[in-house]
Amino acid sequence: MIARLKLLRRPGRAPAAEAGVDLLPTPAAVEVTPRHVRVGDGYAATFAVCGYPASVGPAWLDPLLSYPGRVDVAVHIAPLPAEVGAPMLRKQRARLESTRRLEAEKGKLGDPMVAAAATDAADLADRVARGAAKLFRTGIYLTVHGRSPAELAEVCAGVRSAAAGTLLDLQPATFRHHHGYTTTLPIGVDALGMTRVLDTDALAASFPLAGADLAAAAPGQRTSREAILYGVNTTSAGVLMWNRWAQDNHNSVVLARSGAGKSYFVKLEVLRSLYTGVQVAVVDPEDEYTALAEHVGGTVIQLGAPGVKLNPLDLPGDRRPDMLNRRGLTLHTIISVMLGTAGQASGVGPAEKAALDRAITATYHQAGITNDPGTWDKPAPLLRDLSAALERDGDPAAAQLAARLAPWVTGAFSSLFDAPTTTGAAGHLVVWSLRHLPDELRTIATMLALDAIWRDIDTPHPATDKRRRLVIVDEAWLLMRDGEGARFLFRMSKAARKRTAGLTVVTQDAADVLGTDLGLAVVSNAATQVLMRQSTQSIDAVTEAFRLTGGEARLLLAASRGEGLLVAGRSRVPFRSLASGNEHNLAVTGIGGEQ
């Protein structure tokens, strides 16, 4: 027997629609059979939980809530007054005790199940009498969906198997599946009425404390095309799609110990960001992104290679009236980082700052560059011109500063800065490789690479250019250990959102990032935070900074390579990086082939 129910609507707008209230979407027709209902183009069958285990633990409904398929779980709860619940418990205890006595009188061995039930009933009656527990009529129902009757039968078999693994007995709502379908809709109506009395503890344990997966899109809304695949959820087998561009800011931070798979994860994010049209720039200390860039037709700038030069005094391409003044302020930061890298005191005194400010202005003026935008296309001066201007100043502070800059002008550190910039940073993927530089030059090279990247981001673009830009700073501890470098990175993290850009800070040294106020500020300005395997020495600092639970801390200590925890606001999702064969080959290519 098949009953066909047509849902009819009256012509005209409903009062709720006129008031601006969204109505639940309803199918045009529902076809009811003894074994399922057909709703629109899909099929659904409803089951009621009729058998429960003797004892349950926390989140005992999780196997059903996280089943890898479309399963709607509804829990209907109605408080049971004490004056109604107490007589019910007395009758139940009387039945159990009479059963035990009859078996004893007949000389039979006692049934352990009856003895356990009698003890539990007595304990529950005692707690209800003292007000330590309350009783609730609870109905738990599941509606399973499929695209065809065969698929529905397969999913139903899997759901019943998962329920049996937790000692839950599911019974189909035969001839009543249409009532079961409405029971699991968010309208608060229990049309089946197959309830069981549960106490407070059992009912509270049925609710998970946190969702295993990120919240799905609301009905009628699609997942944004900007979301990219991060991996699969390690607890629910769900797929983790994340859209960093829909968050409060577009920044992210990736913290992991060496060998945990952080570079593998970031390379996959770079590839998938390129798929969506994002322009990416990477500061790469270990030449790990070169093969990826060559594969996708990107640009690789090998700082330290023969003939590759980078001029700190280059001008940005914008035409804002205060451009030259802002460039002078950036040079103050660059010079401070240079002096700190050379093993000198990183601080620049007031007299030296004043002398440096005069020298910067004089150096650009000598090159014919003034506040007139018509002069900004002339060749930029070099670092040796700035040193010469300091020597001509006549102030002892200027002479001292020129002496401190000597290693960068004519000494061992000058090879990268003694000529005009040779390579343009243009393309959908630009990788600034620091592999060929000595360790002493990597901090300032990271700073100059970020400066060149930021000059392009900060330059006003045409209104038609709406590309998003992503900046990856791998091994960010190189810059975070320097005060001025950390401040520059912090300013980038604060200003990137307004320029439709996102900053990703990747580091294996959590102490350098979390041990300073500026490092914590960079982390705080990252709406997307990815934690991968941590060392026992750093786990306490990570736990405090990210307010991890004990379980989350243990997860990070024992995480396998490629596994991590996405922390975004109140969302905490454990995941494992997932790549196709071609993506995997690109992600493991590089020094050491880290995965």
Image (cartoon, rainbow, N blue to C red):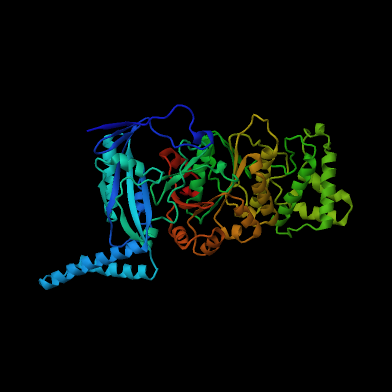
Q: Position of residue 458 (x, y in %)?
A: 69, 39
Residue at 33% x, 39% y: name it: 145
Task: Using the image as rendered, state which of residue 80 and residue 215 is in the foreground.
Answer: 80
Image vertical order of residue 333 relative to residue 37, above or below: below
Task: Using the image as rendered, state which of residue 272 and residue 160 is in the foreground.
Answer: 160
- In the picture provided, is 394 more to the left or to the right than 131? right
Residue at 27% x, 32% y: name it: 3
Q: Quadrant of the N terminus?
A: top left
Q: Position of residue 45 (x, y in %)?
A: 29, 41
Residue at 84% x, 52% y: name it: 355
Q: Position of residue 62 (x, y in %)?
A: 37, 53
Q: Is residue 69 visible?
A: no
- In the picture provided, is 51 more to the left or to the right than 366? left
Residue lying furthest top in this view? 11
Among the 4 quarters of the image, the one containing residue 583: top left
Residue lying furthest front in this view? 83
Image vertical order of residue 116 relative to residue 1, above or below: below
Task: Using the image as rendered, state which of residue 157 and residue 237 is in the foreground.
Answer: 157
Among the 4 quarters of the image, the one containing residue 320: top right
- In the picture provided, is 10 more to the left or to the right than 48? right
